[in-house]
Image (cartoon, rainbow, N blue to C red):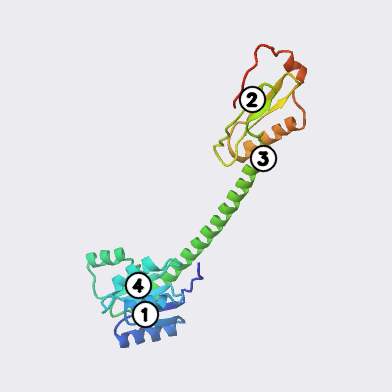
Amino acid sequence: MADLQPQSVLIVDDALLYRRLLAGLLSQWGYQVFEAENGEQALALLAQETVSLVISDWEMPVMDGLTLCSEIRQQVQDRYIYVIVLTARDSVEDLRVGFAAGADDFLRKPVNQVELQARLHAGERILRLEASLASKNRHLSEALTQIEQDLQAAATLQRSILPPHHLRQGDYFADWLFMPSAWVSGDLFHLFPLDDKAVGFYSVDVAGHGVTAAMMSVAVARQFLHGRTVDPSCLTARRSRRRRRWYAF
């Protein structure tokens, strides 16, 4: 997002004299001033210059002030532009239509200097808030991207601990389907030989979800991966030669 410059103001008015009077006043207040005589010229200038405050007349040829507001909201996406519309209209319906078109504020013509300066300061405060919010959202997005990358790496690591598919140990065959509820989970399993006649398997299911459960399940699985399993004699003693089962988990 481009850096906002609230000190830059675009004045849009088809009346040259009135436009120059406003430009001279804003220049005295320290603003950098740009000028356009209709909405089309204003849009072309906004595409070239980083302007975030627009003061536009409502009634203009070629493209009036409300059409300009609508086009600004549709076309300018890299920053927020605060639009003040100058008009002699004061009915509630006119204001409703103006706000619906995208105007932020209204000033009656002829403009009172004190009121104009107050409205410009209010616009600058809103622009600073918009810039601060955009910066925080950008940092949050970057942090979320980093977290997702870390979780993807953790998921890849967890899957690397899982056994290959189509496991076979003697007469025993096993296969599996692993679908974690999150990026990672607290589930791990494996199949391994106990001796030439028996196989063992473990299925670890840690309560909870996410990284904490996954770390605990990996810690438990490491005990099996390093050979610290149940004594094979305890398993083979209960094994029946006539009851061989196929496991799928």
Q: Which residue is mark 4?
A: 84
Tag of residue 244 = none
* Nearer to me, 110 or 95: 95
Q: Tell me how far mark 3 sits from mark 2, CA to CA.
A: 20 Å
- Lateral position of residue 58 relative to residue 171, left or right: left
User: Which residue does the image show at 68% across and 25% down from the upper left?
Assistant: 201
User: Which residue does the image show at 40% across and 78% down from the upper left?
Assistant: 45
Mark 4, Cα crowd under 10 Å, few <14 / some 14-19 / many 20+, is many
* Nearer to me, 57 or 67: 67
In the figure, residue 51 lies in which quadrant? bottom left
Q: Position of residue 78 (x, y in %)?
A: 46, 67
Q: Nearer the viewer, mark 3 or mark 1?
A: 3
Q: Earlier in the sequence, mark 3 or mark 1?
A: 1
Tag of residue 173 = 2
Q: Tell me how far mark 4 sits from mark 3, CA to CA.
A: 60 Å
Tag of residue 160 = 3
User: Which residue does the image show at 30% across and 74% down from the upper left?
Assistant: 65
The quadrant in which the C terminus is found is top right
Q: Would you say the residues marked 3 and 2 are in contact, meaning their CB atoms lie under 8 Å apart? A: no
Q: Tell me how far mark 2 sits from mark 1, CA to CA.
A: 79 Å
In the figure, residue 70 lies in which quadrant? bottom left
Please, what secondary structure does the residue beneath circle 1 have? strand
- What kind of residue is marked 2? Phe
